[in-house]
Each structure stands twice: as C-alpha cells, then as structure tokens.
C-alpha cells in the first residue's frame, strides 16, 4: 500500500514571516516546542529555520544577530515534497538531503505542513500494528 505524505498528520506547523527578528523566531520555537520553523510569505514557503541553523549561523554571533531578520539566517530553497508524493519518496528526500525536517507543499506550491522523523515514526508504528 502506497500512502501519500498528505495522508499523514503534517500540520500544524510553526511558521514565521521572513522579517521576523531572530530573537522572536527563537521565542516561537521555544513556546511551540519545535525544532523547525517554516518561513512563509503569506502561504508560500520562503525557507526553513532549524536548530541546525541556530548552531551553524547564529550561536557564536549573539548578540549581533539578535535583531536580524530570520530571512538572513534561514536555509533558503530547502528540499521539499508535495503532499501527493509517497512516504517512501519523502524518506528518500530526507536521506539524500540529510535534512530531518522537510516542508510539504500543496500542488499550488502553498505550504501544507512539515514532515519530520517523529511523524514518520508514528506512522510506521501504526502501519505495522495493522
């Protein structure tokens, strides 16, 4: 049985606008207890900001980056999958890109959600019970 990514629980996901200050993005991540933020302009994906971005692009630069917009620190053009793609295809994207958090888009390129290891593990666990 081939299951599409959109059949999983891929939302809600935490988001912020590209002009969100770095310190506010951190606050959103902490308050929502997430490891990644989808950076969106309206409903369109502009990038993704993850814990890895914090470590690689910002941690040693504090306080210089505190007020910088998240657009300057995020990963631009992240790998993504469409909601109609199979879970197997999404797992390949994760493995090939080395990214644990993969945005999911509707066919009109608007944001549908976020796929990450816990969501995949939950699906596989339920699938194996059947």
Image: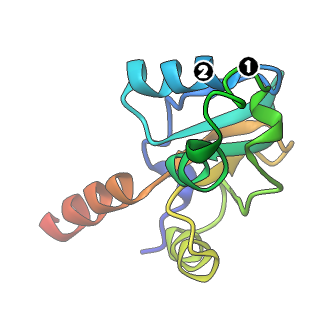
Q: Residue at x 61, y 33 (%)?
A: 62
* Looking at the image, residue 85 lies above or below residue 33: below
Which colour scheme appears in the figure?
A: rainbow
Label 2 sits on a secondary structure element that is helix
Reading the chain from its start, which is encountered first: label 2 or label 1?
Answer: 2
Quadrant hosting residue 114: top right
Q: Which mark is residue 15?
A: none
> Viewer-proximal residue, 20 or 4?
20
> Viewer-proximal residue, 2 or 26?
26
Which residue in the protein does label 1 denote?
Answer: 67
Q: Residue at x 64, y 75 (%)?
A: 97
Q: Residue at x 64, y 50 (%)?
A: 103
* Looking at the image, residue 8 lies above or below residue 63: below
Q: Residues within 10 Å of mark 1 (few under 14, many from 20)?
A: some
Where is residue 23? Give x, y as percent: 60, 21
Where is residue 27? Give x, y as percent: 50, 19
Where is residue 75? Give x, y as percent: 74, 52
Which residue in the protein does label 2 denote?
Answer: 23
Instruction: Using residue 104 as the reference point, say whether residue 72 is left or right of it.
Output: right
Q: Are marks 2 and 1 in contact (CB under 8 Å)?
A: yes
> Which image quarter is the N terminus in?
bottom left
Question: Marks 2/1: CA distance?
Answer: 7 Å
**Number of marks drawn:** 2
Name the residue furthest left: 129
* Looking at the image, residue 126 lies above or below residue 37: below
Q: Residue at x 56, y 49 (%)?
A: 6
Label 1 sits on a secondary structure element that is loop
> Which image quarter is the C terminus in?
bottom left
């Amino acid at each position: 049985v081939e299951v599409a990514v959109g059949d999983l629980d891929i939302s809600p996901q935490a988001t912020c606008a590209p002009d969100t200050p770095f310190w506010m993005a951190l606050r959103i991540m902490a308050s929502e207890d997430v490891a990644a933020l989808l950076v969106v302009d309206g409903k369109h994906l502009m990038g993704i900001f993850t814990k890895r971005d914090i470590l690689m692009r910002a941690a040693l630069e504090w306080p210089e980056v505190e007020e910088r917009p998240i657009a300057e620190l995020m990963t631009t053009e992240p790998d993504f999958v469409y909601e109609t793609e199979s879970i197997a295809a999404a797992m390949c994207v994760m493995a090939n890109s080395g990214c644990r958090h993969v945005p999911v888009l509707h066919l009109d390129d608007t944001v549908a959600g976020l796929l990450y290891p816990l969501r995949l593990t939950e699906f596989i666990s339920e699938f194996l019970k059947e």
